[in-house]
C-alpha cells in the first residue's frame, strides 16, 4: 500500500469513526452499529488478502510437487483400496479355513464314536489337537490386519497433507505406527511377552 | 479348580476382527463354555451388557469406536456392571498399557498371539481369585 492510499484509508477510517460517534451521541443505535460494522469490515481486509495469497502460493507449490511425483501420488488412494482388499481376502480365507477345521473336527468326533484300535484312537486325538492348532493360527488375520489398517491410516494422512487438506480425523495424540498395535520383531521394541506381562501383573497384585 | 466354575456362564466376546471372535468362541467351547455372545467394539458391548445379563467379558483393546480399555473403565464405573470380570486379549503389549489395564481393574491380560493353554490358565486364575474373594 503506497503512502497516498494509506493516507486515504486513514481519512476514510476517521470519517467512519466520526459518523459512528455522532450516531452514538444522537442515540441512533442502528446507524451506530452499521458504521462500526463498516470499520470492522475494512480492518481484516489486509489479513484476508494475505491469507488468500498465501493459500494460492501454497497451492501452486503443492501443485508443483504434485506434478513432479505425480504417478506415485495418484496411486495413494489405489494403494489403500488394495490394502483393504488384502484384509478382506485374508479374512475370507481365515473363515474358510475355520469352516473346514470345524467340519474336520466333527468328522474326527464321529470316527472316535466308534470302537477304534489304540493307534487309530491316538491318531484321532492328535488330529483333533492339530485342528485346534490350525484354528488358533488363523489369529494371524487379526494381527496382520491391525498392522495393515495402521499403514492405511498413514497413507490417508500423507495423501491429505499433500493435497493441502486437513487430514480427516487427524489427531496429534493418535499413536504413531510404532506406538500401538502388534509389536513387530526388528521394528518395535515395546513388545512384552506373556511372561513379562504375567510378571508385571503379579507385581501389581494380579 | 474348574469344578467350581459354572460352565453355563454367559460370556461376551468383544473384538473388531470376526476371525478372532470366532477363534476365542471356539476355544471357549473347547473348554466347555458354550453360552457366548459377540460384539464388534466397546460401544456395542456396553449396550449389550446393560440390556442383557452377562457373567464374563473377554475383550480386545484396539478397536474402532470404543476401545477395550475404555470399555473396561465404563464397566468399572457402572454400578450394575462394576463386578463383572474382564479378561483383556490384545496385541497391545507395552508396559504402560498393561499397567493402565491393571489400574483400571482388569482381571487378566493375554497378549496375542496366544495359545489355548494360555487362555485356559488365565481363565482358571481369574475364577480362582474370584472364588477366593467370594
Image: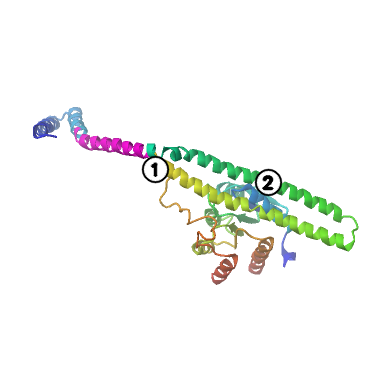
The magenta region covers A42-65
Q: Is residue A131 left or right of residue A141?
A: right
The residue that mark 2 highlights is: A95
**Numbered-mark total:** 2
* Above-or-below relation of A82 to B59: above
Q: List the single residue furthest toward the bottom.
A: A203
Vertical relation: A103 (above or below) B117 = above
How did the renderer colour the structure?
A: rainbow
Q: Chain of mark 1?
A: A
Which tag, 2 or 1, sits closer to the chain's start? 2
Residue designated by label 1: A161
Dividing the picture into quarters, in which one does residue A16 lie? top left
Q: Nearer the viewer, residue A112 or A32?
A: A112
Query: Is the residue B43 above or below the residue A17 in the image?
Result: below
Q: Position of residue B17 (x, y in %)?
A: 61, 48
In the rendered image, the quadrant that contains the C terminus of chain A is bottom right
Q: Does residue A128 appear left or right of residue B98 in this picture?
A: right
Neighbour tally class for label 2: few under 14, some 14-19, many 20 plus, Cα within 10 Å: many
Q: Is residue A48 magenta?
A: yes
Residue A117 is left or right of residue A52, and the answer is right
Residue B49 image offset from top left, x and y in percent = 61, 50
The quarter of the picture where the N terminus of chain A appears is top left
Q: Nearer the viewer, residue B21 or A205?
A: B21
Query: Height in image: B96 above or below A29?
Result: below
Is A25 magenta? The answer is no
Q: Label 2 lies in what chain? A: A
Please name the residue shown 65% across and 69% down the image: B132
Image point 74% across, 50% down: which residue?
Answer: A101
Measure how far apart labels 2 and 1 are at the Cα level. Answer: 37 Å
Q: Nearer the viewer, residue B28 or A91?
A: A91
Amino acid at each position: 500500500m503506497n503512502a497516498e492510499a494509506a493516507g486515504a484509508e486513514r481519512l476514510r477510517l476517521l470519517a467512519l469513526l466520526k459518523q459512528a460517534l455522532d450516531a452514538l451521541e444522537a442515540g441512533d443505535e442502528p446507524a451506530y452499529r452499521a458504521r462500526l460494522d463498516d470499520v470492522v469490515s475494512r480492518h481484516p481486509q489486509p489479513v484476508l488478502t494475505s491469507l488468500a495469497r498465501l493459500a494460492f502460493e501454497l497451492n501452486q507449490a503443492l501443485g508443483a510437487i504434485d506434478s513432479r511425483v505425480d504417478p506415485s501420488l495418484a496411486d495413494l488412494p489405489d494403494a489403500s483400496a488394495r490394502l483393504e482388499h488384502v484384509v478382506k481376502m485374508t479374512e475370507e480365507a481365515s473363515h474358510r479355513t475355520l469352516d473346514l477345521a470345524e467340519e474336520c473336527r466333527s468328522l474326527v468326533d464321529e470316527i472316535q464314536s466308534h470302537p477304534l484300535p489304540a493307534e487309530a484312537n491316538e491318531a484321532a486325538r492328535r488330529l483333533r489337537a492339530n485342528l485346534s492348532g490350525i484354528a488358533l493360527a488363523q489369529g494371524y488375520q487379526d494381527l496382520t490386519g491391525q498392522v495393515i489398517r495402521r499403514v492405511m491410516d498413514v497413507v490417508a494422512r500423507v495423501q491429505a497433507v499433500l493435497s493441502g487438506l486437513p487430514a480427516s480425523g487427524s489427531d496429534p495424540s493418535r499413536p504413531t505406527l510404532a506406538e500401538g498395535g502388534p509389536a513387530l520383531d526388528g521394528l518395535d521394541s515395546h513388545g512384552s511377552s506373556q511372561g513379562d506381562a504375567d510378571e508385571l501383573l503379579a507385581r501389581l497384585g494380579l | 479348580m474348574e469344578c467350581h466354575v459354572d460352565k453355563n456362564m454367559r460370556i461376551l466376546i468383544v473384538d473388531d476382527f470376526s476371525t478372532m471372535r470366532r477363534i476365542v468362541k471356539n476355544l471357549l467351547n473347547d473348554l466347555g463354555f458354550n453360552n457366548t455372545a459377540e460384539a464388534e467394539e466397546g460401544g456395542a458391548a456396553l449396550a449389550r451388557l446393560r440390556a442383557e445379563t452377562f457373567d464374563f467379558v473377554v475383550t480386545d483393546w484396539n478397536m474402532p469406536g470404543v476401545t477395550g480399555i475404555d470399555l473396561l473403565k465404563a464397566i468399572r464405573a457402572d454400578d450394575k456392571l462394576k463386578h463383572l470380570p474382564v479378561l483383556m486379549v490384545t496385541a497391545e503389549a507395552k508396559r504402560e498399557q498393561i499397567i493402565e489395564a491393571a489400574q483400571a481393574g482388569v482381571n487378566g491380560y493375554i497378549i496375542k498371539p496366544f495359545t489355548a493353554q494360555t487362555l485356559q490358565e488365565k481363565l482358571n486364575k481369574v475364577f480362582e481369585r474370584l472364588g477366593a474373594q467370594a
